[in-house]
Amino acid sequence: MKNRNYKIVKVLIFSILFLVSLFANINQIDTQSNIPKKSVLSCTNFAAAINETILFGNNEDGNFGHYLREYPLSSQMFYFPAEADGHGCTFVGWLRDGYIRGVQGGMNDQGLCYDLTGIPEAPMISHPENPYRIGGNWIQYDVLRQNANVSEAIDFLQNVNWEGPIWYQWFFADSSGDMVIVSPGPNGELAFTRKVAGEDGFLTQTNFNRITNESEPGKFNWQRYEISTKMLNEIRNEENLNVTAFNSILEAIHFNKKLGFTGYSNVFDPINQMAYITFLSQFDKTVAVNVTTELSIPGYRAIPMTDYFSQETIDAGLSYFKDYKRRTAFVFVGLPVIGTILLISGIVVASFYTIRKLKRKKTAKN
């Protein structure tokens, strides 16, 4: 009987240790994947230019805290036709309560494209003498409205008084093939990672500062960067630089196997003024949007991305999204509850047999 009780306690202890180890490893995998619970910025942007072909790609990845995690159908295309105050432009993002709350990237009718990635917050030196102030202005809108190319965008940003720290970096590309990543530098000023103008090549960025290499703890930032770099290097000629190739890269680096999801993906063609949109990781169902046609319609418009897709594609995307929600619920709710129950049960059982054993010893002595 004693041996049997000992074995029961031993099995319980080993079971508890196993579950604790399993849960710790899952949390470690999540940390290494750069998907912390409070993170909402986990995107990757890249662009490539060969001869007369230029493409710009982006994944809108997210997890806990991201608005699209709760409302995956709220992603939108925003259209602002050209007016006296500037160029026509389109943006990708989402609405919240009927208002524009997320404008992550865009392209104007001159071929200037941009997107953003979140990085660790960096302090900036104040320049009150600069004419443009962040407070009260919509800088993403103004950048596309007022600038036609990368050089003009750089000049614009150098005349901004940032009025505080920056927690993101910009990526710009234009119809000439010029590209630049704009990061907060270690000296409190903007720093630039620029492709050599007029030469074929590419740039890619994710959630680490391209100047300081600083990132949130974890390695998946670098994995996304390394995978995209490798795949972009394999595009050797203009014929192979196409939307299919860019979608392959976007699919390879999005959160399809991790505890996260991709709300939408986009590929901009600044020369032909085309936007290629993918909804909730359905990369075999990408749709082409003629931006010139959309901007020819007068007045500002917000069009749900789902308007461009079939119901079958929407349903498939939502099925993927629901699977993601179930996985996160199991890992971050189910496993802790199960582990806690087993831990308490193990302590109770171990305590019972320990007390029983002590009583027996006491009885034997008497």
Image: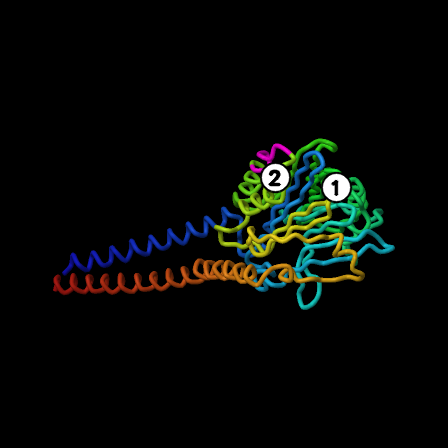
Seen in the image, is 338 located left or right of residue 135?
Answer: left
Q: Is residue 188 above or below residue 196?
A: below
Percent across and percent down for residue 122 are 67, 46
The residue where tag 2 is placed is: 213
The residue where tag 1 is placed is: 175
- Classify mark 2: residues with Cα within 10 Å, few (<14), some (14-19) or many (20+): few
Q: Disc 2 marks which amino acid?
A: Asn
Percent across and percent down for residue 229 are 58, 37
How many numbered marks, from 0 up? 2
- Classify mark 1: residues with Cα within 10 Å, few (<14), some (14-19) or many (20+): many
Percent across and percent down for residue 201 are 66, 34
Q: Secondary structure at mark 1?
A: loop
First of labels 2, 1 by sequence position: 1
Percent across and percent down for residue 64 are 55, 58
Seen in the image, is 262 located left or right of residue 180?
Answer: left
Query: Image point 57% across, 63% down: which residue?
Result: 311
Give whichever of 8, 111 is nearer the camera: 111
Query: Image point 61% across, 46% down: which residue?
Result: 44
Give whichever of 127, 198 is nearer the camera: 198
Question: Which quadrant holds the C terminus?
Answer: bottom left
Q: Which residues are magenta?
A: 231-237
Give whichever of 253, 161 is nearer the camera: 253
2 vs 1, front mark: 1
Instruction: Classify residue 47 by image quadrant.
Output: top right
Q: Per the image, is 236 magenta?
A: yes
For the residues labelled 2 and 1, the Cα–Cα distance comes to 28 Å
Q: Which mark is residue 121?
A: none
Q: Disc 1 marks which amino acid?
A: Ser
User: How was the colour assigned to the protein in this rendering?
Assistant: rainbow
